[in-house]
Amino acid sequence: MPSETLKIGYLDGAVIALFVAAVLGLGFSARLRDVSILQYLAAGRSLSLPAFVATLVSTWYGGVLAVGSSVEWKGVGGLLLFGMPYYVFALVYALAFAKRVREADQISIPERLAQRWGKAAGLVGAILIFLLAVPAAHVLMLGTMVHLVTGWGTVLSLVVGTVVGTLFLYRGGLLADVRVGLLAFLLMYIGFFVVLGWCLIHMPPATMIRKLDPALLHWDGNVGWVGLTSFFILGAWTVVDPGFHQRVSSARSPELGKRGLFYCIGFWMLFDVMSVTTGLYAIALLKPTPPGLELFPLLGEKVLPPGLKAVFLCGLTGAVLSAMVGYTLVSGATFGREFLGRLNPSLDEQAIKLRTRIGFGVACLLAVGIALTVQNVVVDLWYAYSGAVVGALILPVTAIYVPRFKLTVSSKWAVASMITAFITSFACLIYGKRTDNPSLEVSYAGQTFTFGTLIPGLIVSAIVLSLGELASRRATTYDKRN
């Protein structure tokens, strides 16, 4: 947690108070059409195009404070390394997954795993999705914003930000999340337009570039083609992201979900350009450069007048809050509906809703605990912790939704692939921590290859599924002969 705090005057305080009131007002005023679990978790599968685009854009970009870390780390290359892979896989999702995800009766990934490979696969999938959806990164970033504004201690900032930020979720579910997401979407673009506009007016880009370390201006972030390939593979996270899946499942129609993703990609590209450019200005203007999570807030402190500074801070906070709420909803639903509900099929909808709300609390407690141990959001959480889960899920999930990816493996092989892949990736995570190389970088022939935890898990998953496929085909051949 940063040691500095921001200077919040009366005007800034009034804008921030208005923002908090708007968030709580929008969240608590959500009115569900009925009391069904489908209405609570998927808004009755009736999201309009504006609601779908706004909430998915803001949720998927909830790591906005960590963009500062990525710009400090890779400079201009952040556009390619942390942007392009996700555009490509979002396009793949739109073309190959979106319609099938929305057309299915099931609204979650564990449900589809259970439908394809049975109860055990659904339970293992639920555990992995829960671990992936726990909003630790967003809790840390929201806690950072609370601390910068209030000066409160680390634990208090994390707890207050988490409780206040998710309180309305217990009542309104996805509909409350969407209403807050619409506000976050507007504010994140307005906020960056304000701060980037100020920077461009007061410092021409050529002047800014001269103030930067030349290493930050390499188009590929100095990772080379091999490193670029490894970063690109990490973009496959999109395929199994539970927040992505939930929004597409909740769209009004299959065609709307597919078309909405095209709009989302355009908005993500625009915001990436704005945020990375702003990050470069921040590095040029703030000497010495503060740690990544503080980069944008301290830039606003330095360059913006009262009132506009608060607008920028609210834009940052809104994006983080929207993502935290979205992933809390997914993790709570996974805990209550997909895990506890699957263990006890006799539970009715009200009992599942109660357990889902308990899941919100469990996910938030776990998120706060993880946030207290994190040093670097990008490396520790996204590329180490989350990568360990993603590598175990990519191939089984792809096999469900892409007809050409035909697998005839039995349930035991599918379950074994997820478990062994996760164990392998988690072992790599521990090894990376112990060797102070959390991203598992390997240098060879002048090139740096970032294995991360996703790639080892993906390789093991592919091996186990291939063995299962071979065993299945041999069994089929044997049966035909006899």
Image (spheres, rainbow, N blue to C red):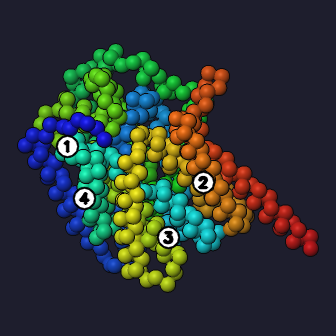
- The CA distance from mark 4 to mark 1 is 17 Å
Q: Looking at the picture, how far across and down is residue 42, in whole percent?
A: 40, 68
The three-letter amino acid code for the residue at tag 4 is Val
Q: Residue at x 44, y 40 (%)?
A: 378
Task: Give the foreground label among 3 and 1.
Answer: 1
Any part of residue 267 in sight: no
Mark linked to residue 122: none
Q: Residue at x 36, y 70 (%)?
A: 357
Task: Give the foreground label among 4 and 1.
Answer: 1
The three-letter amino acid code for the residue at tag 1 is Gly
Q: SS of the residue at dot 4?
A: helix
Task: Determine the image quadrant of residue 271.
Answer: top left
Which residue sits furthest left?
Answer: 10
Mark linked to residue 164: 4
Residue neighbourhood size for the residue with mark 4, other residues' Cα within 10 Å, grouped as few (<14), some (14–19), many (≥20): some
Q: Looking at the picture, how far across and down is residue 10, in whole percent?
A: 7, 43
Mark linked to residue 422: 2
- The CA distance from mark 1 to mark 2 is 39 Å
In this rendering, would 480 be left or right of 387?
right
Any part of residue 19 in sight: yes
| Residue topped by disc 1 | 151
Task: Determine the image quadrant of residue 202.
Answer: top left
Decide: is 96 above or below 477: above
Mark linked to residue 338: 3
Q: Which residue is drawn at 65% across and 26% down?
A: 444
The three-letter amino acid code for the residue at tag 2 is Phe
- The CA distance from mark 3 to mark 4 is 26 Å
Q: Looking at the picture, how far across and down is residue 20, in whole percent?
A: 19, 54
Q: SS of the residue at dot 1?
A: loop
Decide: is 322 above or below 307: below
